[in-house]
Structure formats: C-alpha cells, structure tokens
Image: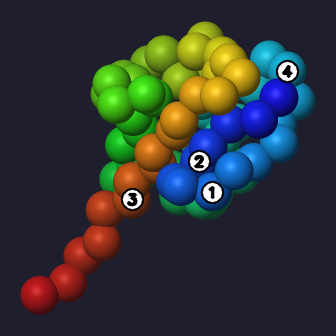
C-alpha cells in the first residue's frame, strides 16, 4: 500500500504499524513524536496502530542545540 511519510511517498506492506514506520525513518528510541493524518499517536499505541492506504505520517525527532 502507499503512504506518505514525512512528505515522501512510500510503499509499505499491508499491516505496517506506526512503530514500523518510525523504524523506517529513524533508529532513535526517544525524543520521537508521530502524527497520523494530523492526529498525534501516543507512543503506547504505536505497535497497535496499523497504517492504511493513503495515510499521511509525520515522524518528528527532537534536536538539541542552542
């Protein structure tokens, strides 16, 4: 199925979860936030939230600096 992750069209297998989408983009395990179709997805539901065709996923990582 086709989804958009951080503005890029991607082909992912049916049943891909938010957690798997995050791992596609980053190896970071903390400081990561996710929005699915403009709604925040809480970390506790990443493994159980499955993507659907045409979903839009935004994966944001915190950056430190001054």
> Above or below — where is 21 with respect to 8?
above
- Residue at the top extreme? 48
Query: How many labels, in total?
Result: 4
Q: Considering the numbered disc 3 on the image, is that residue within a helix, a strand or a loop?
A: strand
| Residue 64, x across and y down, in percent | 24, 76
Residue underneath mark 4: 14
The reply to whether callout 1 and callout 2 are in contact (CB within 8 Å) is: yes
Image point (63%, 57%), residue name: 8
Residue occupying the point 75% across, 48% down: 10
Disc 3 or 4, which lies upstream in sequence? 4
Q: Which residue is mark 2?
A: 5
Instruction: State which quarter of the image contains the N terminus.
Output: top right
Spatial distance from mark 1 to mark 4, Cα to Cα?
18 Å
In this rendering, which labeled residue sits more in front, label 2 or label 3? 2
The reply to whether dot 3 and dot 4 touch (C-beta < 8 Å) is: no
Q: Earlier in the sequence, mark 2 or mark 4?
A: 2
Question: x%, y% of residue 48?
Answer: 61, 12
Instruction: Give the class, few, some or many, for how many residues have Cα within 10 Å of label 1's Cα (few <14, many ≥20).
Output: few
SS for callout 1: strand
Q: Is residue 45 above or below residue 41?
A: above
Closer to the observer: label 3 or label 4? 4
Residue located beneath label 1 in the image = 8
Secondary structure, mark 4, is loop
| Residue found at the far bottom of this picture | 66
């Amino acid at each position: 199925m086709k989804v958009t992750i951080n503005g890029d069209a991607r082909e992912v297998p049916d049943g891909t979860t938010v957690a798997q989408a995050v791992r596609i983009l980053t190896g970071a395990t903390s400081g990561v936030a996710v929005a699915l179709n403009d709604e925040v997805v809480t970390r506790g539901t990443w493994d159980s939230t499955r993507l659907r065709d045409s979903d839009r996923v935004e994966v944001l990582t915190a950056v430190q600096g001054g």
